[in-house]
Image: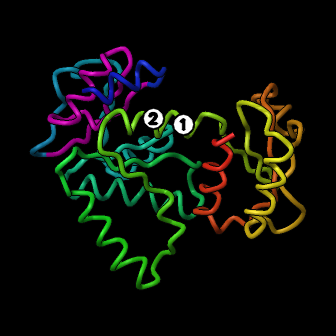
Amino acid sequence: LELAKGLVQNNYQVITGAGNGIMEAANRGAGREKSFGLNIKLPFEQSANSYIENDPHLIEFKYFFTRKLMFIKESSATVLLPGGFGTLDEGFENLTLFQTGKCMPRPIVLLDHEGDNYWDHWMNFIRSAVIEKGYAIENDLSFIYRARSSQEAIDRITNYYKVFHSLRYIGDLTVLRLTKPLPLDLIKTLNTEFQDIVVKGSLQSTPPHKQELQNNEYPELPRLSLYFNKSAYGRLNQLIEAINQA
């Protein structure tokens, strides 16, 4: 409830799975006009909660895979709260797509409250059974942000887009659109720190690319462009975090 209210106050809308419990609280907190529900048709368990039921913002899906696609395609951030197999499935879907560059960069927040160790157990498993055994690398943990309060989750999302605005791939070029120009000394520092993910040239402040201009894609925003290796997405996420310190 508190999380959804806070996100709406920061000009975000909220998408939930439309069910009861935590999902119902989020739809209630955001209000009907600022929330959407993506319900899954099941022979048991799932039905739309009263705060989104019979609303045009309620969309029903037969298949989980199309529902998950809409969750990611139509959102800018993901907040996961303790749950069952479905929660973990959607969480791993987010991480897999980010790790392989199949979705745009986004904050992925693991939220529970003080005294709850649900995500601590999960993180211990990821470190011991996945990272330490080489199935993923340490930098991939940068995809995940651990929050202990709704405000901490809200701050993570808003700070992620403080300077970073959006990303566009144009051939081999990766263009980061920004909310403000970066100082030259910061660009110099970023070139030193992130040269390992640049396959040629350097990070440079650039005007909008001609393809962006043709499509009228945020022509007013400054850019930082690089020839990214398109494999080290954990490092790309760290670059975004460093840009947001400007």
Give me the residue at 85% from left, 31% from top. 213
Query: Is residue 90 shown above or below 201?
Result: above
Name the residue type under label 2: Asp
Q: How is the image coloured?
A: rainbow
Name the spot of residue 195 as percent of width and height, x first: 78, 66
* Horizontal side of residue 129 vs 169, given as left or right: left
| Segment colored magenta | 13-42
Task: Find the residue positioned furthest to the front.
Answer: 185
The image's mark for residue 159 is: 1
62 drawn magenta: no
Name the spot of residue 95 as percent of width and height, x first: 45, 59
Q: Are marks 1 and 2 in contact (CB under 8 Å)?
A: yes
Query: Is residue 82 shown above or below 202?
Result: above
Q: Quadrant of residue 211?
A: top right
The image's mark for residue 155 is: 2
The image's mark for residue 14 is: none
* Horizontal side of residue 92 vs 173, given as left or right: left
